Amino acid sequence: MGRSVTADESTEAYIQDLIKGRQWYIGLIIGQLSSQKDFVLRLARTPEAAEDDVCDESEVGQLEELPSHSKKKKTTQPKSLDKADEQWLAVHATQVTRMLPGGLDVIGIFAVAPSAMLKDSQAKLRQLIYAIHKSVMKNVPVQPPGAVTDRIILQVDSMTSKIVCSSIDVSTIKSTLRPAEWRYSSATRWLRLESAVAVDVSFAVLAQAKEQSWLKNIQTAVAPFCQNVWDSVALVSGEVRDKTELLAAFPEGKRGKDSISVILEDTYNVDFLMPLKRTPDMEEPEVKEGKKIVSVRGIIVCRAFVQWKATIKEAVDAVKTDVIRSLCARCELLSEDLDLTDEASVLDSRQLFDTPVRVFTAPTESGAQICDYMFQDEKVEEVTERIQELLDLKVDPESLEMNCEHPARENDWVTASHSDHSLNSSQDGSKPEKPKLPVYIGLAVSAVVAVGAATMSYIYSDSI
């Protein structure tokens, strides 16, 4: 039996608008995968490639370092779909994935073109879907257990409006296309899960360590924290519930396909109990010379969206995914921003670098949201322009939810500075020696208003 794909009815009008353009298009399918049935929230046409972002095969490994907040000069679209730039589509998929809360992913690609062009581009479509999967998975420090590896390929004949939907298993290069059912529905309903997670990760950069980028160092450091998130026990609305239960609760006698409107709750709060890992046989510590201490600290807002038939396991996994994705997205964006600055000047003084704060908006009336990350020096118009470019979605600035997070306040900076000072203070209370290497503090990530002020910071120090 093939996969069943249920798309929000807004996607039908979107496809018809693309057909009216009378040219070929390639883009991403955004939605949620499950064991057999998939849900599509929206389609997002891939913008024309920018000259500085088009790369050859030798640069594939550096895709995650391409700046997503900078404006580039557009290039001309190729004449045929089989000439589509797979690396640019992979970059687009990576940037869009950052803008998706837990539960939502890039689950496939769509192509709108004349039938003859589609027929000649079958091999290219396979190539594109594998390139996207490789790019999106590259920066994920922990892979979710039992993740669905099927992806959707939707082909739309721009002359006849005929739709052909297929699925392919991206876990193996030998996979073949399998027919899938595509249908529209106005009855899709998304349930929302919320959480606020504190992050406090510190690591040392050894003096003799091989030089790595900011991003690689941070990814290595936060990987154990991300693993702890996956290993944690989740409380859903204050309770530990059976993983096989349905998340949604229904009134007595009202459970079933026609009872979506009587779900008792739309929003669920999730808390995590992190495991306390002990090592029974401690090895003798090895002393090494360090040149930097890096701390990542703060509280982040997490949200996830699942369909009304989701189980507790699916819902909890969606929130855990959002914790990891949001943390990694902030680290990536700040690293990209700092890569554009003169690192030598950054090392001259102690500093806190705010990561962008998270903002949300709803692309449809179904209840699901998408997000973006906004630096302090950015304007609201820049956020809406970015959403329009990457998601092909016009957003009213007033619809942006911008008060769920805030940058580090002045007292947060003081707290972080005092913590760093204690690292360099002697036990007898005497004034510490002036460090030989410059010290600076970085990555002050947004705190959560509802939970309280906190900073997430990189603390670089030569005193270990």
Image: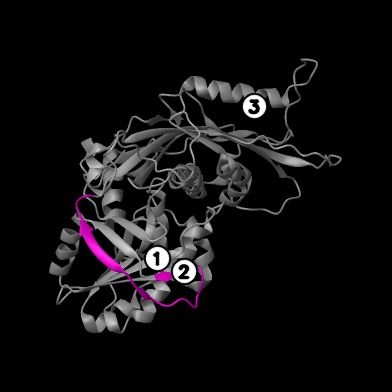
Q: Nearer the viewer, residue 97 or 41?
A: 41
Q: Is residue 182 visible?
A: yes
Instruction: Residue at 24% x, 52% y: name it.
Output: 393
Q: CA distance from mark 2 to mark 1?
A: 7 Å
Q: Amino acid at mark 3?
A: Asp
Q: Where is residue 128 shown, x and y percent of the image? A: 40, 71
Q: Residue furthest front?
A: 253
Q: Nearer the viewer, residue 412 or 270?
A: 270
Residues in magenta, as a range: 168-187
The reply to whether discs 2 and 3 touch (Cβ–Cβ < 8 Å) is no
In the rendered view, would you say 170 is above or below 317? Answer: below
Dot 3 alpha-carbon crowd within 10 angstroms: few under 14, some 14 to 19, many 20 or more: many
The reply to whether discs 2 and 1 touch (Cβ–Cβ < 8 Å) is yes
Quadrant of the snapshot with the C terminus: top right
Check the image and tell me how it is coloured: one colour
Q: Secondary structure at mark 3?
A: helix
Q: Residue at label 1?
A: 151
Instruction: Residue at 34% x, 66% y: name it.
Output: 109
Q: Is residue 210 magenta?
A: no
The disc at residue 420 is 3
Q: CA distance from mark 2 to mark 3?
A: 46 Å
Q: Secondary structure at mark 2?
A: loop
Q: Residue at label 2?
A: 170
